[in-house]
Structure formats: structure tokens, C-alpha cells
Image (spheres, rainbow, N blue to C red):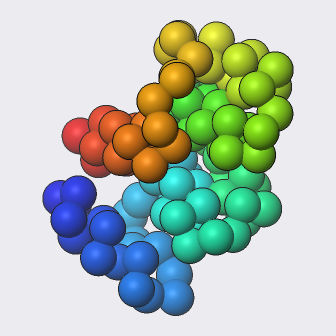
Amino acid sequence: MEFETYKSSLAQDAPPEGLSMAAQALWWEAKGDWHQAHQCAQKQPDADGAWAHAYLHRVEGDLRNAGGWYGRAGKTPSGAPLKEEWETIVRALLG
């Protein structure tokens, strides 16, 4: 899926079919549903899920928890603006 298609899908009530749980997590976060996003991230037990999980805890303001998830993802904790990091992760997840 192209990034612009993903982004425009935010006008819908549910994420598009075929997205990974990590991509769904970031979709729900962008819709303002942090709890649904967190549930999705928890369902993907790989590095991509950990990266989305790290971002979500950064959004929440729990930087200690986020740091642990960045480590599991093999990523350096981000200091980028949240919207910029969101786009970076989404683009990586979409390939």
C-alpha cells in the first residue's frame, strides 16, 4: 500500500484490509484511539510491533517504557517530532 492511500484511509471507520498489526496500531493512534492502537501493537511480537509499541509509549509520555520497546525493536529512541516519527514508521512498515 502506498503511504498516501494509507493516510487517506484515516477518513474511514476501520483500517484497510491486509495491514500488519503494527500498521494498524499506527492507524488507530492517528485516529485518536491510543488504547486500540496499543492492543494492536501488542499482537505483533516482532521488531516492527516493538517499534510501533515504542512510538505509542512515547506518545503517552512514558519515555522509560518507550526506551525498552525501542531496544526490542533494535532502534535508537527517537527525538523527532511525533508526527515525523509516525510517518517514518508507517513508511517503513508499508515497505
The foreground one among 25 and 21 is 25
Q: Compared to 87, does 85 lie above or below?
A: above
x 52%, y 11%: residue: 76
Pick the quarter of the image with the N terminus.
bottom left
How many numbered marks does the figure carry?
0
Q: Is residue 30 left or right of residue 67?
A: left
Q: Position of residue 82 (x, y in %)?
A: 51, 43
Compared to residue 26, the image places residue 72 above or below, namely above
Q: Is residue 70 above or below residue 13?
A: above
Res 55 → quadrant: top right
93 to 50, vertically: above or below: below
Task: Name the residue rendered at 74%, 17% in the picture.
Answer: 68
Q: Left or right of 83: which side holds 28?
A: right
What is the x, y in percent for residue 70? 62, 19
Quadrant assignment for the C terminus: top left
Q: Residue at x 76, y 46 (%)?
A: 60
Q: 86 or 1, which is in the foreground?
A: 86
Left or right relative to 44: residue 1: left
Residue 9 percent location from the top left of the image: 35, 77
Q: Quadrant of residue 92?
A: top left
Inspect this view and state whether residue 45 appears. no
